[in-house]
Image: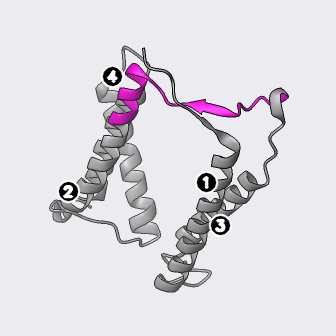
Amino acid sequence: MTPTQSFGLPPARRFVGLLALLLAAGYGVDAWQTLSVGRWHKPGAAIFPIAVAILLAISAVSVLLEKHGGADDPMPATFSLPEGADLRRLLKVLAAFAIYFVAMPLIGNMIASALFLLASMWLLSDDPKRSVARLAIYAIVIALSFEVFFVRLLKVQLPGGVFKQWLF
């Protein structure tokens, strides 16, 4: 049996907080410079990335200001990576992410998102009687909602893929 590898949280949390703050700043500045903010009655494509950057910066600052209360703290000072079946499930979800990003330019955002959502919901579900048809319906509804909200409403350019002429 291999020993569980654990990581200390306070120094790692500070590092992740600083990294997230740096990424939020870079992401927000890039969105501000490269995308159109638009007007109040017609917002541009930069609104959503700037809002995400602000939320990420707030989260990073809250992580940096967090105090660890020692032994009485309900949040543990260390964490362990999953093992066995949980580790395999985590690696499958990470592989699904990688396939999603490779497939998106080829088959388009909407189809790739629906397939990714289906795979991730199936992999993360603990229900042994999970219905693939029900999960597929959820995945399609979520992918269509994202398409309507981001592409149609906010006018964000997302990859259409080879099936673009047949979709919407």
- Mark yes or no: residue 137 visible: no
Label whose residue precedes the other's in the sequence (4 or 3):
3
Q: Quadrant of residue 110?
A: bottom left
Q: Residue at 50% of width from left, 31% of height from top?
A: 81
Instruction: Confirm or deny contact between disc 3 and disc 1 (CB under 8 A).
Output: no
Give residue 54's mark.
3
C-alpha separation, residue under disc 2 versus residue under disc 1 = 34 Å
How crowded pointer 3 is (Cα within 10 Å; few <14, some 14-19, many 20+) is rated as: some
Residue 142 x %, y %: 41, 46
Q: Which residue is mark 2?
A: 107
Under tag 3, what secondary structure? helix
Q: Nearer the viewer, mark 1 or mark 4?
A: 1
Write down the region rendered in magenta: 72-92
Residue 71 x %, y %: 81, 28
C-alpha separation, residue under disc 3 versus residue under disc 1 = 16 Å
Q: Which residue is mark 1?
A: 16
C-alpha separation, residue under disc 2 versus residue under disc 3 = 31 Å
Residue 59 belongs to the span the image colors magenta: no
Three-letter amino acid code at the position of disc 1: Val
Q: Which residue is mark 4?
A: 131
Q: Residue at 84% of width from left, 27% of height from top?
A: 72
